[in-house]
Amino acid sequence: MLRRTHCCASRAPPVIGPTRKARFASIDDNPTIAYTPWDTTEPLMADYGWTRGKLPKFRARSPYHRQQIARRMVTEMIRKDYCIVGGARAPALRILADQVVELAKAGDTDSRQQLAYFLHDPLMVDKAFDEYPRRFKDMSSKYAMMTRLKSRRRTDAVAMYFVEYKNRDMSDNHKGEDYSVGPERFFLPPRIVETEKGIQRPPHMQMAFDRWASKFKTEEFHHWWRLRHAKMRYWGVRNVPHPSDVDPLWTEKEEEEWHNEMLANMGDFEELDLEDESFESTGEGGEPSAVGDGPRRH
């Protein structure tokens, strides 16, 4: 005979047999402790979800993978000034890009450290803090813009979005770039409009971009690229060519042609012969020349 159980305590009496909990049984309508794993009011520390005040929770393998996707998207957004993403990643990237500008306009050491923790490339931290305060000094919010593209992604029919920073004319690194047609290779700089053909980029950022692009021109990357094709064929991905049929992304001939084209587009600058001993120029802190501050020839 079963013993009678009275509900004299605060908990419910035990139930004998297999039971199924209600769908919202674990949700407390009157919580006593509101626990948040981190302060979501800080930039780049927002939580992902479908409630108000959270970033759109785009598809990923895990929360860690979702954060890695966000870091990669923001890093490439700063590097190229635009990013083409699909689905719920686009509004999340737009919000994170706005928060990057807020950190850059703050300009203090803690903001720089927080952005350095988030990004994959430390050079992009310097680029953001050097460019964005001047570029967005007349704006207070909505620094990034999201535009839906006409076509969807062919593989899974996901809506694609073009996310970009506004006020590009105030940017020394991206002024005059034409994004209507992409470059011939993804690691090449974007096309320049006809009115800005001879524009010069800051040398340190040009060197940073060349260093980033150079790793895709190496023999090691070509080996990895062929190995990736072999793995994709093994995984069952369709329409993947055989590794022996994969050509390198960049060759010495293309490098030479590209270099000659860049030299032709640089404009008419004075060619200085570094081996010419008659050339004289005072260094920093030296005596100014009689002609002026510029270099002097005998």
Image (cartoon, grey):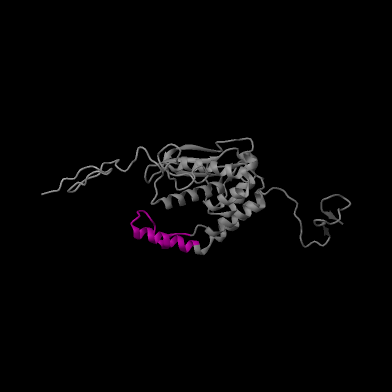
Camera-nearest residue between 63 and 34: 34
Residue 225 showing in the rendered view:
yes
Q: For the view shown, which residue lies furthest in the left direction?
A: 1
Residue 179 vs residue 232: left or right?
Answer: right
Camera-nearest residue between 176 and 70: 70
Residue 236 vs 36, above or below: the answer is: below
Residue 20 vs residue 222: left or right?
Answer: left
Camera-nearest residue between 120 and 149: 120
Q: Quadrant of residue 36?
A: top left
Residue 65 vs residue 268: left or right?
Answer: left
Camera-nearest residue between 69 and 193: 69
User: Main structural element of the magenta stretch: helix, strand or loop?
Assistant: helix
Percent across and percent down for residue 134 are: 65, 41
- The quadrant of the rendering that contains the C terminus is bottom right
Residue 278 vs 47, above or below: the answer is: below
Residue 280 vs 148, above or below: the answer is: below
State yes or no: residue 242 in magenta. Answer: yes
Percent across and percent down for residue 80 are: 55, 47
Residue 174 showing in the rendered view:
no
Q: Residue at x 43, y 41 (%)?
A: 56
Residues drawn in magenta: 221-247
State yes or no: residue 13 in magenta. Answer: no
Q: For the view shown, which residue lies furthest in the right direction?
A: 290
Give the number of callouts.
0
Q: For the view shown, which residue lies furthest in the front direction?
A: 8
Percent across and percent down for residue 65 are: 42, 52
Percent across and percent down for residue 260 are: 63, 54
